[in-house]
Amino acid sequence: MLIPLDYYRILGLPIQATTPQLQQAYRQRSDQLPRSDYSQAAVAARQALLDEAYLTLGQGSQRQAYDETFLAGGGNTAPPLLDAQGRRRVKPPADRAQMPMLDLDGPQIVGALLLLQELGEYELVLELGYPHLSNPAPIEAGQFGEPQLALADILLTVVLAYLELGREQWHQGQAEPAATSLKIAQELLLHHGLFASLRGEIQADLYKLRPYRVLELLAHPDENSVQHRQGLQLLRSMLKERNGIDGQGDDRSGLSVEDFLRFVQQLRMHLTTEEQLALFEAEAKRPSAVGTFLTAYAAIARGFGQRQPAFVRQASLLLRRLGNRQDVFLEQAVCALLLGRPEEATRHLSQSQEQEAIALIRQQSAGSPDLLPGLCAYAEHWLRTEVFPHFRDLVQAGVSLKEYFADASVQNYLESLPEADPPGNEWTVVPDRASVAAAAQITPNRGSQRTLATLAALGDRPVIDMPQFPWQRPNPVPPATLPLGLDAAPAPVPAPLPDRGASTVVPFPTTARASSAASDRGGPSIEAPSADGGDRPTRTRSRSTRTARGQSSQTGDRLPILIGVGIVVLGVGGVLIVRAFQAIGDTFQGGPTLEGEQPILQLDRPAIEIPPPQVAPKPETALSAPTLNPEAAQQVVKTWLTAKAEAMGPEHQTERLAEILLDPMLKTWRARSREAAAQKTYWEYQHEVKLEAVKATPDRPDSGQVTVEVREVAKQFKGGKLDRNGSRDEVLRVRYDAVRQDGRWHLRDARVLR
């Protein structure tokens, strides 16, 4: 079989490699053993290809012939090298004009697939290896060696290729393609009943990937699509496993309670009012205080946005349950305003402790006998900037109290309302959708034709021009996409409860590889991660901060029409109220009560107090130097050699590797440490380092190169005994690629120059 490989690629070298580099690469590749699940036959086949490449390139005459033919073809053909039987060993590809090909026998194909997988050629591994799994006849016939071992080795290589491909797609923000790759790998293992530990590793990745999939699926442009519905189903599964939105269950996503609340806040902008009501009503009935709050929020949005004040009444009842434990009087005042209950709205304002907000409302009501004009202005602004942007179907909708009160269905419903709702237990279960819908269908009281005419006359008035409140902000940023780190739990997403003056998207952090992928693609970061791949600052502020800043910027303009219309619109509320339907309130009362102390919730504060991260100042060291100078370069190399000695020493401690290395160097040395531990082998090192050159990259201040001369005395021990054959004393000239990440310098790659 023709395999797209050449001897330089097998050793991981350019064609310009020197003899010492060739020797070093061969030694490193030989020491870097593959995963221990592979059979000895596969490991031997891989080593045979390494030996063949080294012997060919290590002999001057053969390498010269190889290079001449290779260069003569411009890299498009391979040299006519013959094997021991005189057959053409290296052949030009038929359909891969830019790749030399090796003609390999059956047993060596397994070793070649293993090498391709190590080189990151995952698509190529799948192209060459998967057909043998779907049609295993050649394997069963013994063409690849002992059938059971060959099947397991090829299966393992293909599965690992799917796993790594899925992780690359995950890092690139492609959550659904990543899930598909991981699921295929898992299904292959289940079908053959092999490598149970690897199945568990894949399943763990799928659980961690779920929040990213939810965001990607819910953001599908068609809210009626299969993808959008699948996202909702995944979200409900997570909620069930966590025992609710603020539950203590484990969905194995790695998200804490606070992180999950932020995640829910982030995904809300992808859901309609109908979807949020259905979702959060179910959560409120667990019961859940957070679910109760979010249901009230969704009910206000639907009630005003779709001219169905029955849902505003539902929200009012829900907020009343929270009112004895939390200051939500401003929200209750807005609901009373929308229900045409001016006295109740005024009473709620008088109970609120939000003094700065109340002061601004008073300023807007100057010259009026009550606070209704200012509350009218506040309500319009709040609905426009802090309610509608969190709902997929309302984000572009307009907000007008005049149009709301002029709507005939709103007028009919308001006339049917009692003057006030009867008292009840504030912790009763949320009314179900059927009762809300039934309340909306109540036959209105047609007796007050004068009131109907007054409200309808608002349609002839100009639109109320609301003032620019100090906390007014631009429209929230669009949802970001997600590159995810696999080595760490996903980071926080936006705050669980909406702040009146803020709309934020908090990104997920990524590993070094994910960050690199994000920067390479110049794209977004389920870190919806940020649209440019970087972190967005969290922008939240308290109501007091907003209003305090606003007092200095308030212009003091008074809009007579605002005051007049506000009085006309809301002053007639008392006329609208009839007591004939006092029983309506009973529809929403009764039911079981919540047990125990419940969280206190408020629109402008998180359900759980989340203090800002307090990062203790660290003393500046060479590793945290802002530029790659000689001192920093010397220190980073010494730190790396110390970490190497620990990783390859008797205890095989790899923790410090992550403090100084980045992938691919980190991945390589972790694997070497694991393999040495499995073989009961360790080294003792002595190093002498001489700094030769430090080269900073002008256009990339966070990267550079360090060239050093290192004398390494390495004593190898096997089974606790010194192995002189494996020990060495050599002087090497090494060039390291240095990268600054999280304010510290790390090494990403190393090349032996001689």
Image (cartoon, rainbow, N blue to C red):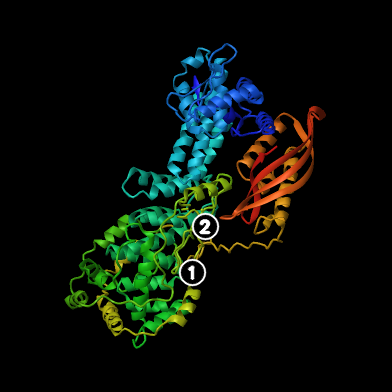
Q: Residue at x 36, y 59 (%)?
A: 391
Mark 1 is surrounded, within 10 Å at the Cα level, by few (under 14), some (14 to 19) or many (20 or more) other residues, namely: some
Q: Is residue 593 at all visible to an observer of this figure?
A: no
Q: Identify the image quadrant of the C terminus.
A: top right
Q: Residue at x 44, y 19 (%)?
A: 135
Marking on residue 535 = 2
Q: Residue at x 35, y 63 (%)?
A: 388
Q: Residue at x 42, y 82 (%)?
A: 554
Q: Is residue 559 left or right of residue 496?
A: left
User: What kind of element bears circle 2?
Assistant: loop
Q: Is residue 53 left or right of residue 647?
A: left
Nearest the viewer among 49 and 654 is: 49
Please say if 390 is above or below 689.
below
Q: How many marks overall?
A: 2
Q: Which amino acid, mark 2?
A: Asp
Residue 348: x percent and y percent? 41, 76
Residue 244: x percent and y percent? 48, 51
Q: Earlier in the sequence, mark 2 or mark 1?
A: 1
Please say if 25 is above or below 255.
above
Label 2 vs label 1, nearer the camera:
2
Nearest the viewer among 563 and 730 is: 730
Furthest toward the bottom, the residue is 367
Mark 2 is surrounded, within 10 Å at the Cα level, by few (under 14), some (14 to 19) or many (20 or more) other residues, namely: some
Q: Which amino acid, mark 1?
A: Gln
Residue on which disc 1 sits: 326
Q: Is residue 74 at all visible to an observer of this figure?
A: yes
